[in-house]
Image (tube, helix red, strand yellow):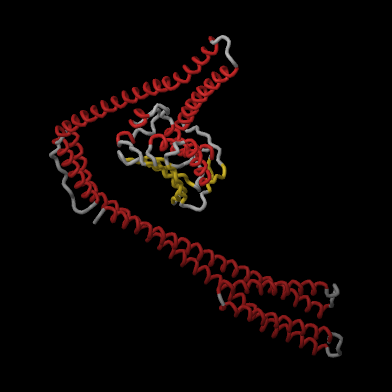
């Protein structure tokens, strides 16, 4: 048997004994309270009968004295005693009613006996009144005979017997109640002694039962733990049956076997650890190489920024020097110098603005002005502007696959993205450019497709890096700064959308961005 079962049985027995003892104690208290209440009521009823007996005999004596020697107080004494008698009867009726509620209907006989006593008293009162009315009759001998008959027969024989019967019955009830109380107390004492003995036997049996089953397995486990502490991994604990401690012993033996196995495999683990250290070292070297590349990219970024800003700044300074050294020039010549200076400054401002926008996007600080926007009109406007500024030999078509494309966005920034993609297609693509507006499950998508030379896969991974220009753009075109696509990516991601370029060498470029039309944009402030 398992120890948990033994403990459960032992404590369940003790709990049952405790509950039984509590029930016996409760029953004992209720029974004692019941018997005590009955005994007290019986005593009160007996005392009330004694009071009734005293008052009635006093009343009859008063009547007898009044008949024999005359009424000296005008009937006041008789009236007071009569009131006391009726009070006694009323109290007896209440007390007997309480006895009926406690003891049951067996006490109803007492109410009937009380009613007979009450009728007997009323009858005697009527007799005395009749005797009192015949006090002035001419037959004194007959009056004395009737008085003697009332006193001897009706009071001494009838009334005294009823009253003695009531008193005897109440004394008998008091004795019976006290006997029942004593019997109940004896029963309670016997039950308490038996419950205590059973509880003590159960506790002793449980202690011996558990001690016998626990001492030896615990001793074996302690010896095993000490042996393992000394390094004796071949030591095994004797398992004692299918008990909790037996299972602990089995688990202990299995643990020692595993420890021994692990000790045997320490050398292999060290080899594996060395290999892992080598692999981690190689990873750290690769990471260091990546950091070097990142540092080179940072330096290249600074160099590109310096290069891109140096050209317009040189133009501004050169135009200013020309204007300052020119001597007498016409207003038109000065105007041309100022126009070229302003164009160079605008170009510089655009580069700085694009760099600042991309940097804010990387820091999560982009601010866009959201409003209700018709995406179809933005695309149509950008396509119309592209046709006006582009090569007339190139074909630009627009196809809207949705009837309405309303969403909350920054219209100026979204049109800037469309313009960037369209200008790239016009500048670096082929002769045919297609712009398409589609609906997606979560919003809308704008796609710009050209039939130009395309981009290699190695270049697609860098198109969204700042100042990166593909082979086609770097070798064939002088314009551009390499900031268009990074700016477009920052704008689209600020709206919660996505942008991507797909291409195959010789098969053109497909630029596509999507915008959501429902969710609140996290980048907007």
Horizontal and vertical percent for residue 285? Answer: 26, 25
Which one is nearer the viewer's eye here, 349 or 110?
349
Horizontal and vertical percent for residue 246? Answer: 21, 49
Q: Quadrant of residue 148?
A: bottom right
Q: In this rendering, is residue 448 above or below 49? A: above
Res. 201 visible in picture: no
51 with respect to 504 (left or right) = right
- Give the mark count: 0
Which one is nearer the viewer's eye here, 299 or 187?
299
72 with respect to 386 (left or right) = right
Res. 207 visible in picture: yes
Q: In this rendering, is residue 338 above or below 421? A: above
Which one is nearer the viewer's eye here, 182 or 292?
292
Horizontal and vertical percent for residue 154? Answer: 70, 84
Q: Residue at x 30, y 37 (%)?
A: 457
336 with respect to 427 (left or right) = right
Which one is nearer the viewer's eye here, 230 or 376?
376
Q: Quadrant of residue 160?
A: bottom right
Quadrant location, the N terminus: bottom left
Q: In this rendering, is residue 372 above or below 67? A: above
Horizontal and vertical percent for residue 440? Answer: 44, 50
Quadrant location, the C terminus: top right
Q: In this rendering, is residue 63 above or below 309? A: below
């Amino acid at each position: 048997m398992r120890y948990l079962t033994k403990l459960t049985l032992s404590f369940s027995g003790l709990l049952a004994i405790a509950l039984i003892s509590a029930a016996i104690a409760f029953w004992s208290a209720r029974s004692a309270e019941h018997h005590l209440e009955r005994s007290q009521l019986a005593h009160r009823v007996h005392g009330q009968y004694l009071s009734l007996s005293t008052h009635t005999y006093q009343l009859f004596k008063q009547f007898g004295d009044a008949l024999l020697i005359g009424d000296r107080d005008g009937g006041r004494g008789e009236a007071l005693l009569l009131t006391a008698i009726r009070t006694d009867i009323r109290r007896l009726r209440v007390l007997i009613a309480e006895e009926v509620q406690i003891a049951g209907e067996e006490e109803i006989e007492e109410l009937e006996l009380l009613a007979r006593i009450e009728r007997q008293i009323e009858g005697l009162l009527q007799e005395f009144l009749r005797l009192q009315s015949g006090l002035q009759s001419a037959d004194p001998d007959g009056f004395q005979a009737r008085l003697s008959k009332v006193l001897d027969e009706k009071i001494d024989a009838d009334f005294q017997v009823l009253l003695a019967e009531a008193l005897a019955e109440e004394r008998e009830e008091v004795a019976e109640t006290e006997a029942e109380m004593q019997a109940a107390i004896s029963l309670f004492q016997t039950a308490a002694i038996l419950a205590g003995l059973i509880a003590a036997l159960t506790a002793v049996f449980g202690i011996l039962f558990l001690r016998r089953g626990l001492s030896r397995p615990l001793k074996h486990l302690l010896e095993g733990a000490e042996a393992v502490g000394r390094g004796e991994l071949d030591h095994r604990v004797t398992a004692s049956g299918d008990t909790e401690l037996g299972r602990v012993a089995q688990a202990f033996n299995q643990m020692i076997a595993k420890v021994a196995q692990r000790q045997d495999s320490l050398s292999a683990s060290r080899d594996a650890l060395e290999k892992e250290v080598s692999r981690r070292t190689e990873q750290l070297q690769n990471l260091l190489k990546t950091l070097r590349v990142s540092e080179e990219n940072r330096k290249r970024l600074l160099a590109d920024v310096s290069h891109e800003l140096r050209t317009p700044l040189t133009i501004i300074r050169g135009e200013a020097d020309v204007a300052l050294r020119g001597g007498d020039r016409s207003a038109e010549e000065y105007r041309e110098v100022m126009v070229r200076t302003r164009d160079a400054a605008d170009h510089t401002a655009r580069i700085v603005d694009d760099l600042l926008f991309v940097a804010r996007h990387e820091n999560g600080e982009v601010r866009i002005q959201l409003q209700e926007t018709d995406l179809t009109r933005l695309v149509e406007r950008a396509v119309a502007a592209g046709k006006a500024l582009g090569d007339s030999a190139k074909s630009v078509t627009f196809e809207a696959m949705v009837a309405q494309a309303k969403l909350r966005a920054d219209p100026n920034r979204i049109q800037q993205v469309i313009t960037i993609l369209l200008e790239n297609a016009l500048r670096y693509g082929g002769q045919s450019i297609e712009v398409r507006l589609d609906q997606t499950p979560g919003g809308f998508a704008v796609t710009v497709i050209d039939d130009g030379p395309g981009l290699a896969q190695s270049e697609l991974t860098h198109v969204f890096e700042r100042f990166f220009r593909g082979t086609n753009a770097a070798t064939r075109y002088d314009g551009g700064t390499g900031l268009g696509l990074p700016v477009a990516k920052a704008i689209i991601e600020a709206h919660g959308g996505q942008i991507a370029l797909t291409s195959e060498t010789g098969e053109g470029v497909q630029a596509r961005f999507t915008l959501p039309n429902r969710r609140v944009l996290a980048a907007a402030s």
